[in-house]
Image: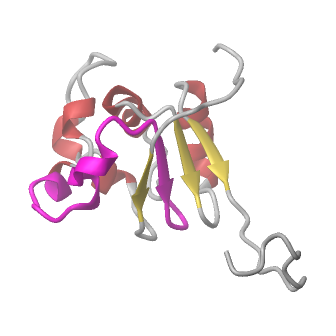
Amino acid sequence: MKPFRSVTARVAVLDRADVDTDQIIPKQFLKRIERTGYGEFLFFDWMKQPDFELRRPEYAGAGILLTGRNFGSGSSREHAAWALQEYGFEQDMQALGVHRPTFEPRARHHVLPTELVVRASTAPPRPDQEGS
């Protein structure tokens, strides 16, 4: 695997918690023996919904997927990593809690899972930040 340097890309937000691998890539598409061709089936059932987040025009071509907690729960399915990568995501970032069993397959297939830790600031705003 090539070492990670940096990713500069548009971010798509999937604000849903507990998205499991069956929602990422449904089981009916797992009968293939190839490691390619899964991107078109990413979030297959949700993509049929006209108001699904990833169908928003501003997310077209996004390279980073920002998700809710526990993204990729369920079985540790490499097919989910293949689908994310083929769809165009180089990195998926989770607001809270990386689902550990799916962390390694995603990293192995060049989709870098990253856990974001968001903390509320108790410091007063700096003078140059007031009113912004």
Left or right of 2? Residue 44 is: left
Against 118, residue 2 (above or below) is above
Q: How many marks?
A: 0
The C terminus: image quadrant: bottom right
Task: Please tell me whether residue 59 is drawn above or below residue 34 in the rendered image.
Answer: below
Query: By what rule are the colours in the image chosen?
Result: secondary structure
**Quadrant of the rendered structure where residue 60 is?**
top left
Counting from the top left corner in percent of width and height, residue 35 is at 34, 19
Q: Is residue 122 above or below residue 31?
A: below
Magenta residues?
45-71
Judge from the rendering whether residue 130 lies leftward or rightward of residue 106; answer left or right.
right
Please state which of residues 55 and 43 is positioned toward the viewer in this rendering. Answer: 55
Assess whether residue 63 is covered by the magenta stretch.
Answer: yes
- Asked if residue 90 lies left or right of residue 2, the reply is left
For the N terminus, give its image quadrant.
Answer: top right
Q: On the rendered structure, is 15 left or right of 66?
A: left
How far from the left and from the top, in percent, is residue 94?
58, 58
**Can you give x and y, in whole percent of width and height, for residue 9 in the image?**
50, 35
Residue appearing at x 54%, y 64% in the figure:
70
Residue at (60, 31) in percent of width and height = 7
x 32%, y 47%: residue: 59
Q: Position of residue 98 (x, y in %)?
A: 62, 56
From the viewer's side, name the closer residue of 39 and 55.
55
At 44% across and 50% down in the image, what residue appears?
Answer: 75
Q: Residue 83 is drawn in which quadrant?
A: top left
